[in-house]
Image (spheres, rainbow, N blue to C red):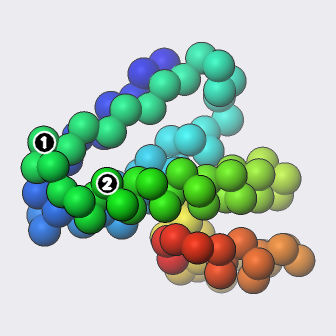
Amino acid sequence: MDVFICTADPYKEPPMRVVNTALSVMAYDYPTEKMSLYVSDDGRSQLTLFAIMEASKFAAHWLAYCKKNALVDRCPEAYFATDHAWFPETAEVKVKPCLV
């Protein structure tokens, strides 16, 4: 499965939304060896590039957290905005560099 996320204007498509979309896709319950995620930024925004680079660091923690706790809301922005059952490592994941 190939997933393309296209963006062009960091003001109309905030980098945090792009990042949350990418993290949500990466957290799908789908074999990782059969999935590819591509981000196309036609606006060449340095902010979007930086956000994606930081998201790649955060993804290691977030994806493990999603899998371990069988989360349904896998978008960090949506998950931390709600009153879901919190797990012991939730506070630790929430303060990882990047996002939320």
**Nearer the observer, 37 or 86:** 37
On the rendered structure, is 87 left or right of 11? right
Label 2 crowd bin: few (<14), some (14–19), many (20+), radius 10 Å? some
From this viewpoint, which residue is outermost toward the right?
88
Give percent across and percent down for residue 36.
Answer: 49, 25
On the rendered structure, is 48 left or right of 80? left
Give percent across and percent down for residue 41.
Answer: 20, 44
**Looking at the image, which residue is at 23% across and 60% down?**
46
- Using the rendered image of the protein, determine whether residue 13 is visible from the camera's viewpoint: no
- Name the amino acid, label 2: Leu
**Looking at the image, which residue is at 50% across and 42% down?**
25
On the rendered structure, is 70 left or right of 57? right
**Looking at the image, which residue is at 41% across and 54% down?**
52
Which mark, by number, is residue 81?
A: none
Judged from the image, the secondary structure of the residue bearing numbered disc 1 is loop
Give percent across and percent down for residue 78.
Answer: 51, 69
**Nearer the observer, 15 or 81:** 15
- Name the amino acid, label 1: Asp
Residue receiving disc 1? 42
Give percent across and percent down for residue 35.
Answer: 54, 23
- Using the rendered image of the protein, determine whether residue 80 is visible from the camera's viewpoint: yes
**Looking at the image, which residue is at 45% across and 54% down?**
53
